[in-house]
Image (cartoon, rainbow, N blue to C red):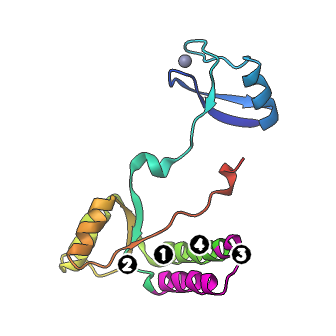
Amino acid sequence: MIRYDLLCEYDHKFEAWFRDSAAYDEQVKAGEVLCPFCSNDNIRKAVMAPAIASHKESVASTGRELAIEAAEKAADDMREGTDPQDAAHAFMEVVNKLQKHVEETCDYVGEDFAQEARAIHYGEAEERNIYGEASPEETRELRDEGIEVLTLPKPLDKKQAN
Ligand SMILES: [Zn+2]
């Protein structure tokens, strides 16, 4: 069984269970899946993107070496003419390593990232590496103030591929 978050034509959100993705396709095509709110049968899958919903980037104030390693690796692969898919895969491996490193060595401060990064930079908070979320504007402002901020690329979510 597989659960999908679904949307009708009028953006009513509901969830439904299907035997598998093929059963979902068949039932939607046959008009058997109805919105519980308005009985509309123009049903589509809701896009699952929590990170996009908040418009925030994952950022950290450390991990510079690993980020450089990832970028250099990607550049090398390009020069060597590696298959782009292999190169992307290798790049994501380094990115995953970077994210793990960040999670292990940095304090998670969530949406307070910008505030906390400033406090550390100006000596108002204990010096340490932190990570959390910040908007692209916040990230830019921090960089303008000379605070080193690293934007973490999002890992590939293989579960969403279908
Ligand atoms: Zn509806």
Q: Do the residues labelled 1 and 2 touch (CB within 8 Å)?
A: yes
Which numbered dot is residue 102?
A: 1
Foreground disc of the pair 1, 4? 4
Label 1 sits on what residue type?
Val
Label 3 sits on what residue type?
Asp
Height in image: 23 above or below 31? below
Q: Do the residues labelled 1 and 4 touch (CB within 8 Å)?
A: no
**Separation of residues labelled 1 and 2 (CA atoms):** 8 Å
Look at mark 4 in the image and give the residue it sits on. 96
Element type at mark 2: loop
**Separation of residues labelled 3 and 2 (CA atoms):** 36 Å
**Separation of residues labelled 3 and 4 (CA atoms):** 20 Å
Most distant residue in the top direction:
39
Which numbered dot is residue 83?
A: 3
User: Magenta-highlighted stretch: main secondary structure?
Assistant: helix
Height in image: 150 above or below 110? below
- The first of marks 3 and 2 along the sequence is 3
Which range is magenta?
65-87
Which numbered dot is residue 124?
A: none
Label 2 sits on what residue type?
Asn
